[in-house]
Image (cartoon, rainbow, N blue to C red):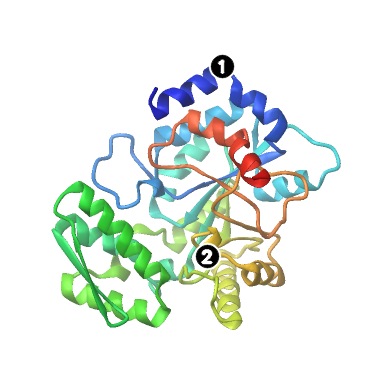
Amino acid sequence: MNGGGWRRAVTALGVDRWARRLWGGRGAILMLHGLRHDDAAGWRGDPGLVTTVGQLTAVVTTLRAEGYEIVSLDAALERLAAPRPEPRFACLTFDDGYRDNYELLYPVLRRLAAPATIYVTTGFVDGEAPAWWHGVEAILVRCPALDLHLAGRRHSFSAADPATRDAAYRQVCALLRNAAPDDRHRALARLERDYGVDFIALSRERMMDWAMMRELAASGLVEFGAHTVSHPVLRGLPEITARTEMAQSRQRLEERLGRTVRHFAYPYGDAPAVDVQAVALARACGFASAVLAYGGPLRAGAPLHALPRIPFGGADTADDLRIRLSGVKTAFATSA
C-alpha cells in the first residue's frame, strides 16, 4: 500500500477520529504560505510553500466537517485559557505576505467566510530585504548549474535534470540560511552579478503592497502579524539584533496599517531557528502569541510564545490534515 493509500485507509476507518479524542487537544493552528491556481504548472524549489485554491478549500471544508470552528488567533487564545473545553477550533495562518494571498486567498476567505492571519516580513514589502530563496529558484529554473561563493569557498551544483535541480535548491538554501548575515549578503550580491537576477525586485513582485494589506485588514477577515524585517534565523543572533527585527516589523505594520499588531511568527520556525532567547524576546516585546512552524494540536497550557502549528502545503491532502489533527505523531514524539 502506497503512502496515500494507508492515509486513506486510516481516515476511511475513522482511526484518526478515535486518536483525536485522546491527543487532539483543544484545536490547531495551521501554517501555510503561498497559493496558486489548481491548474498552475511550473517547478517550485520548495513545493511545501505553495497550496492550491482547491487544497485550501478542502482544508476549510475538512475542518468544518470534523467539527472545528475556524476562528481568529485572539479567539483561539481565549479558548485555550477557558477552564472548560469548547468545541474544537482551528486558525488559518499564512507566512511571509505573498501577493497571491491578496489575489487568491482573499476571495476564498470571503467565499467561505473564514478568518485568517498573515504574518508579514516587512523588509520584503518595503524592498529592504530579499526573499532570497525565490532568487535561487529563478536561477535554477534557467541555468543547468549554479556556483555559490560563500565565506571564501566555492560550492558548485548541477541542475541539469529535475533530481539534481531539486537537490541543488535544497543544498544552496541550507548553506545560505545557516550563513553569517554578512557572508550571506556578499554571496547573494555575487549571485545577482553572476546570473543577472535582482533578488529584491523578485521579492517585491511576489509580495503584497501596503494598499493590498490595508484592504485585507479593513475586510475584517484578515489580521496581520509580524514576521521580522528580514526573515533571519533568530537563534544565535545578538539580543539587540533579534529584538530590533521583532519590534521594527511590528512598528512598521502598525504605522502602515493603522492597527495594533498582537501576534508574531518566528522565521523558519523550526528548532534550529528558535532558541530560548527568541521566545523570551517575543514575550518581552509584548506579543500576545508567537508561533512555531512545527508541532501538532494545541493543548491547554500550551506556551503562548511557542505555540505549535501544523504545516500544510505541496502535495498534502485532506487525509494528511486529518491525521495531523489527530495528534498521534506529536503524542508519541513527546513520550519517546
Gap between marks 2 and 1, in whole Å?
38 Å
Look at label 1 and name its amino acid.
Leu
Place of residue 53 in the rendered image (x, y in percent of width and height, measured from the top left): 40, 37
- Residue at 56% x, 54% y is 217
Q: Could you tell me which secondary element the residue under label 2 belongs to? A: helix
Image point (63%, 37%), residue name: 327
Measured along the vertical axis of the image, is residue 319 above or below residue 236? above
Residue 136 location, x and y as percent? 27, 63
Q: In which quarter of the image is the C terminus?
A: top right
Please tell me which residue is depicted at 70% across the width and 46% down the height of the picture: 76
The amino acid type of the residue labelled 2 equals Ala
* 259 on left or right of 146: right
**Residue 19 image-quadrant placement:** top right
| Residue 13 horizontal/vertical position (percent) | 56, 16
Q: Residue 126 appears in which quarter of the rendering?
A: bottom left
Tell whether 32 sits left or right of 27: left
Q: Which residue carries the number 1 mark? A: 13
Q: In this view, does 197 lie to the left or right of 268?
A: left
* Number of marks: 2
Q: In which quadrant of the rendered view does residue 247 lie? A: bottom right
Residue 131 in view here: no
- Does label 2 or label 1 sit earlier along the sequence? 1
Q: Which residue is drawn at 38% across and 37% down?
A: 315
Q: Residue 273 carries which label?
A: 2
Q: Residue furthest right?
A: 83
- As displayed, is residue 222 above or below residue 4? below
Compared across the picture, whether 215 is left or right of 189 comes to right
